[in-house]
């Protein structure tokens, strides 16, 4: 099971994502004094495109936004370009976002940056966040971490989760201020950014020692079907990492969730934790049945890894092979017993790995009978067999 060492270089930091209020992040908010980047930009007086000639500015911007979702999103460009030039802040943000996401044909150099400058000047927090990303990336404009942090802090204060995510990145990689970064990421998490939940969780857990807070953040991300967050929960609970109380069952549960979401390490971790709880557990079982009665024989806690998968047919076929030996099993413990048997069907032979029963005589008898059970499939299994007197067998099972 991989351990949750989680160096900061492993943080999943997302470039240009979004955030909400937790605590005021250290970078100061943007200086209210207008600068070359944020001072008001004079609206242009170009005539509207034909599609907007009979529309008000707001209606033109809305029409352009709808076109972004149409089969021909490029038709939105002239509408949103004009609306942005007329200082419609959201038109600037929507067009710039679509360009950055490559949902539109590549624009001329500097176009997206100009959209961000105008949108931010017109009051769009999203545009200010995108402008901060411009300064962080240093492609459309000379890289300036200080300007980036101020713009992103202001956008994050206005609930732009992507700005919070990128600001957290800056606080980790450029400012080495993990406490502030954790707060900013936590804020992004509150706004729904899953990567921010994980990043905050990693810092709180491995660097700040706030285990319960970290687990809550991981749980939030896991609930959003993030496999890595589920795995982290499994590792912390299952191995008792960072001072957390070890809970093998809880660890297995979270690992199973990670496995269901496609994390192969989660599958392996779940099997390891299951085996730690029960030495007779079948690693990688694809057949699990709590209790079943076949031809008068009760079989409990059946676990098998069957070649070709499990399912109802697999369980019935396997139980049927055991039930054929019911009379012989009953003779092993006439007063009733509930031995736990671990065996393999391999190459047409039955290999009994272990029989667990308080009575060595019963265990030896059951092992002898099990070796005679026909191996009709490839399988690794374990089960509790209720043999002999029914009431006595049930009491034996309940006492285990």
Image (spheres, rainbow, N blue to C red):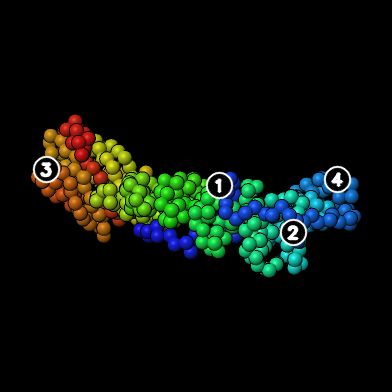
The residue that mark 2 highlights is 35
Q: Measuring from the top left, give residue 306's x and y in whole percent.
A: 33, 53
Between the C-alphas of marks 2 and 1, the distance is: 26 Å
First reached walking from the N terminus: tag 4 or tag 3: 4
First reached walking from the N terminus: tag 4 or tag 1: 1
Q: Measuring from the top left, give residue 121's x and y in whole percent.
A: 76, 54
The residue that mark 3 highlights is 359
| Image quadrant occupied by the C terminus | top left
The residue that mark 1 highlights is 23
Residue 79 in sight here: no
Badge 2 element = loop
Relative height, residue 285 to residue 298 (above, below): below
Q: Measuring from the top left, give residue 50's x and y in whole percent.
A: 88, 53
Badge 3 element = loop
Which residue is painted at 44% across and 49% down in the image? 214
3 or 2: mark nearer the eye: 2
Q: Quadrant of residue 136?
A: bottom right
Between the C-alphas of marks 4 and 3, the distance is: 89 Å
Q: How many marks?
A: 4
4 or 2: mark nearer the eye: 2
Between the C-alphas of marks 3 and 2, the distance is: 86 Å
Decide: few, some or many residues near mark 4? Use Cα within 10 Å; few <14, some 14-19, many ≥20: few
First reached walking from the N terminus: tag 4 or tag 2: 2
The front one of 240 and 387 is 240
First reached walking from the N terminus: tag 2 or tag 1: 1
Please indicate whether residue 195 sits to the left or right of residue 99 in the image: left
Q: Which mark is residue 56?
A: 4
Contact between marks 4 and 2 (CB within 8 A): the answer is no
Please indicate whether residue 246 sits to the left or right of residue 11 in the image: left
């Amino acid at each position: 099971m991989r351990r949750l060492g989680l160096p900061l270089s492993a943080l999943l930091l997302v470039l240009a994502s979004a955030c909400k209020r937790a605590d005021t992040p250290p970078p100061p908010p943007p200086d209210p004094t207008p600068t070359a980047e944020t001072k008001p930009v004079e609206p242009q007086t170009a005539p509207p495109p034909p599609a907007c000639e009979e529309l008000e500015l707001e209606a033109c911007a809305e029409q352009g936004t709808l076109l972004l979702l149409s089969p021909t999103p490029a038709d939105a460009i002239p509408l949103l370009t004009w609306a942005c030039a007329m200082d419609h802040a959201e038109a600037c943000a929507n067009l710039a976002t679509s360009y950055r996401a490559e949902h539109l044909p590549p624009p001329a150099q500097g176009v997206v940056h100009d959209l961000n400058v105008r949108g931010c000047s017109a009051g769009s927090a999203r545009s200010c966040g995108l402008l901060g990303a411009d300064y962080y990336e240093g492609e459309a404009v000379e890289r300036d971490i200080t300007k980036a942090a101020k713009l992103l802090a202001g956008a994050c204060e206005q609930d732009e989760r992507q700005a919070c995510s990128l600001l957290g990145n800056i606080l980790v990689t450029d400012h080495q201020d993990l406490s502030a970064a954790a707060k900013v990421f936590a804020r992004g998490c509150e706004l729904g950014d899953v990567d921010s939940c994980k990043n905050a969780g990693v810092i709180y857990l491995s660097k700040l020692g706030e285990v319960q807070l970290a687990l809550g953040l991981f749980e939030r991300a896991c609930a959003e079907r993030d496999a890595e967050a589920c795995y982290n929960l499994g590792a912390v609970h299952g191995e008792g990492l960072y001072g957390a109380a070890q809970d093998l069952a809880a660890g297995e549960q979270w690992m199973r969730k990670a496995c269901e979401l496609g994390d192969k390490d989660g599958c392996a971790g779940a099997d390891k934790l299951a085996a730690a709880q029960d030495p007779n557990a079948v690693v990688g079982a694809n057949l699990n049945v709590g209790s079943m009665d076949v031809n008068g024989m009760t079989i409990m806690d059946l676990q098998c890894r069957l070649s070709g998968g499990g399912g109802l047919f697999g369980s019935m076929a396997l139980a049927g092979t055991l039930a054929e030996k019911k009379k012989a099993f009953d003779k092993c413990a006439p007063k009733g017993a509930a031995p736990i048997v671990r065996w393999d069907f391999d190459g047409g032979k039955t290999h009994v790995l272990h029989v667990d029963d308080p009575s060595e005589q019963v265990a030896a008898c059951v092992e002898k009978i099990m070796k005679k059970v026909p191996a009709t499939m490839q399988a690794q299994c374990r089960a509790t067999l209720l043999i002999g007197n029914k009431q006595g067998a049930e009491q034996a099972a309940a006492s285990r």
